[in-house]
Image: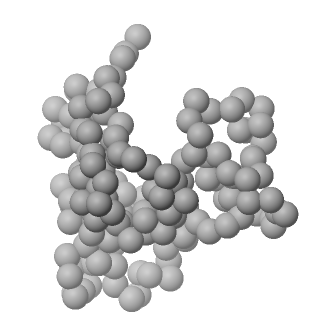
Amino acid sequence: RCPLSGDVVDAPGMVSPAMWPKLSFIAAPYCGCCGFPFEFSTDSSGALCGACLKQPPVYRHARAALVYDDTSRDLILGFKHGDQMHNVRAFLPWLKQAGRDVIDDADILIPVPLHRWRILKRRYNQSAIIAQHLARDIGRPVLLDVLLLISG
């Protein structure tokens, strides 16, 4: 079933044809650092948004496949909190497309850890699930326990 509409689909995690046009995919032009979509065309593919110019992030690149809106929120929250882990099958091609420039340069994939209380509440780390599937799909290693969460 489609995780958004409940309609019958061909495979688990797939989105129904009725819901497909409601998804807002991020495409160029976007910020060369954080991936935030620009509302105007730029001459440079590496142009930065105002926030990244004002205070550069500690990372070099970030990408997202979808604009976070009413439709994508239901899909993402179902995955994060609703045990709809089969949604990762729909996410993979979107993530590979959105992050192709970053993925091509990656030697390994490292998911962001969850705070221990969140992992206890959710029972799984959604970024680790995505990293494992994506790593297998693109033929790169994944290191699940490299980063430590430091709380202040």
x and y percentages locating residue 52 in the rendered image: 71, 38
Q: Which residue is drawn at 77% across and 37% down?
A: 53
Q: Nearer the viewer, residue 53 or 142?
A: 142
Q: Which of 87 and 7 is in front in this view?
A: 87
x and y percentages locating residue 139 in the rendered image: 29, 60
Q: Residue at x 77, y 52 (%)?
A: 47
Q: Relative to 149, is 44 above or below?
A: below
Of all residues, the one furthest to the top in this rendering is 152
Of all residues, the one furthest to the right in this rendering is 43
Q: Which quarter of the rendered picture does the N terminus lie within?
A: bottom left
x and y percentages locating residue 34 in the rendered image: 61, 46
In the figure, is residue 101 to the left or right of 116?
A: right
In the figure, is residue 44 to the left or right of 19?
A: right
Q: Can residue 68 be seen in this view?
A: no
- Number of residue marks: 0
Q: Which quarter of the rendered picture does the C terminus lie within?
A: top left
Q: Relative to 35, is 115 above or below?
A: above
Q: Which residue is drawn at 61% across and 53% down?
A: 35
